[in-house]
Image (cartoon, grey):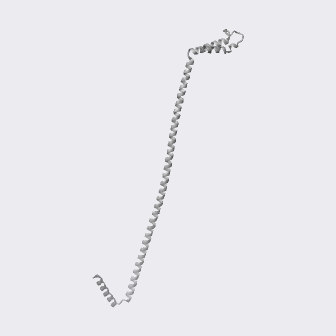
Amino acid sequence: MRLMLTSLFAIAASPALAAGDKPFFSLANTDFVVTIAFAIFIGVLLYFKVPGLVGGMLDKRADSIKAELDEAKALREEAQSLLASYERKQKEVQEQSARIVAAAKEEATNAAAAAKEDIAKSITRRLAAAEDQIASAEASAVKEVRDQAIAVAVGAAKDVIAKQMDAKSAGAMIDASIATVGEKLH
């Protein structure tokens, strides 16, 4: 039925009806021959089921395009999940680097404070050592001055005693010294 309607409309709408001087249904009319050839061509196409084959090929192509679109959609979703994963990892790395920098700054601050404290202790120890050396040098100088003063005093006393001493007073002094030693020992 469809075939008949198609061929009827093709014949009715053809420009062959406009060919003026020859009858339309004559083989001498080229328009009629072309119409018949076209109808035979359409019939051959329908006989060999070319529209079905073309439709099948178009359906196959549509299915392959749909499969490619589905694959592209899956790849896009995978790429988005990878992107989200990498963004998350990048954020974690940035947070970790911020923590490392903060820890390094805190460690540097603590090291600086410890160094200042160590320097202060070292200065205190050096000042104490210097004060001890000064006190030791002072005590040594005082001892040397005393020893020198004692030596001078003994020498002066020796000279004075030697000038004032004669044999009689030397014997009396020796006897007094022996008595004093004897009393102290007993």
> In the figure, 27 relative to 95: above or below?
above
The image quarter in which residue 13 lies: top right
Q: Which x, y percent locates residue 43?
A: 59, 14
Q: Which x, y percent locates residue 46?
A: 57, 15
Q: Of residues 154 and 89, which is closer to you in this image? A: 89
> In the figure, 123 relative to 175: above or below?
above
- Answer left or right for 151 relative to 33: left
| Residue farthest toward the front in the current orientation of the protein | 1
Q: Of residues 149 and 78, which is closer to you in this image? A: 78
Q: Which residue: 47% across, 56% down?
A: 110
> In the figure, 82 relative to 9: above or below?
below
Q: Of residues 146 and 66, which is closer to you in this image? A: 66
For the C terminus, the quadrant is bottom left
The image quarter in which residue 50 lies: top right
- Answer left or right for 67 relative to 7: left
Q: Which x, y percent locates residue 38?
A: 63, 14
Q: Which residue: 50% across, 45% down?
A: 93
Q: Which x, y percent locates residue 104?
A: 48, 52
> In the figure, 71 relative to 114: above or below?
above
Q: Which residue: 47% across, 63% down?
A: 120
